[in-house]
Amino acid sequence: MSAADRPPERAAVIRAAAEPGTTRRSIPDPRTAPIDDTAPAMPGVSADRLRPEALRERFRRPPVWTPEFIDDRWRLGPETPRPAAVLVPLVPREHGLSVMLTVRTAHLSAHAGQIAFPGGRTEPHDGSPVGTALRETEEEIGLARALVEVLGQMPTYTTGTGFVVTPVVGLVDPDHALAPDANEVAEVFEVPLAFLMDPGNHQRRLYRWDDGLERSFLAMPWTRPGDGREFFVWGVTAAMLRNLYRYVAA
């Protein structure tokens, strides 16, 4: 949602955070942010659109659409954001496609312990966002680039930590082997794409600091069958998944 789309009082608060000298803020525990039950209902996506063949065709012939989330620019300082890319890995399974995600290790300086797509900053030799996404994915989780069929790219997202990120969507050979880098990745897991593309599972939440500054964000909590563990997908990762939903549903 752009600043122009926000209610006037909220837009003013968001702009205040972007003034020179303003300290960047992080949300200590996004699970504590209340859910906004007034968010309008969104249409579902048919299962046919989530098949590999349908996604290949969608990226071959993109629809006319507008991404819903493109940046956290209001949290940036004066520096120029650096280019980066992530892979949105889709794995064919018996129940349909799954999205492969990572849990970042707790000691990292940025987004520690959060759920993310594999990826990272662009290096001069990458040649393209696709090159960055595949290289970083191979370095982070050991997924060989030869096992990824790249479908296409999504619109860039500017993060509040200073990166312009290009999401690259790809189909992953289900017989892949992984070797996660223990320094960066605590865990790799998969969530059914159908769950993440169901807008009924998208929560809009609002966190408010003591001085009145607030941040609206998306969350897609998923409980894993079997052990009942909850994975709290939120922030940039959830925003990119919401854009993918918009793209598939358009």
Image (spheres, rainbow, N blue to C red):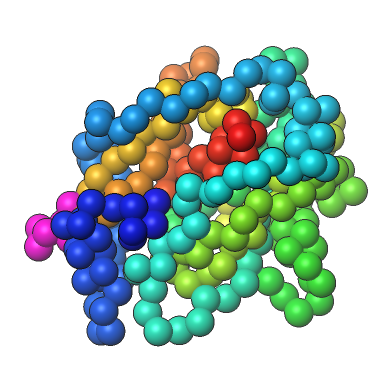
Let me know if residue 211 is in the magenta part: yes
- Highlighted magenta segment, given as a residue range: 208-213
**Viewer-proximal residue among 142 and 117:** 117
Q: Residue at x 22, y 37 (%)?
A: 34
Quarter of the image that includes the C terminus = top right
Residue 172 percent across, percent down from the top left: 79, 38
Whether residue 200 is situated above or below residue 18 in the rendered picture? above
* Residue 250 appears left or right of 112: right
Q: Residue at x 82, y 72 (%)?
A: 127
Residue 174 percent across, percent down from the top left: 81, 30
Give the image quarter of residue 45: top right
Residue 223 percent across, percent down from the top left: 45, 23
Farthest residue to the front: give it.
64
Question: How many numbered marks are there?
Answer: 0
* Residue 17 appears left or right of 194: left
* Residue 27 appears left or right of 47: left
Whether residue 14 is situated above or below residue 91 in the rendered picture? below
Look at the image and tell me whether residue 188 can be seen.
Answer: no
Look at the image and tell me whether residue 9 can be seen.
Answer: yes
Whether residue 108 is situated above or below residue 28 in the rendered picture? below
Whether residue 161 is situated above or below residue 207 in the rendered picture? below
Instruction: Tell me the chief SS of the magenta region.
Output: loop
Q: Residue at x 41, y 68 (%)?
A: 73
**Viewer-proximal residue among 110 and 13:** 13
Farthest residue to the left: give it.
211
Give the image quarter of residue 88: top right
Q: Residue at x 55, y 44 (%)?
A: 243
Let me know if residue 143 is in the magenta part: no
Residue 207 percent across, percent down from the top left: 23, 49
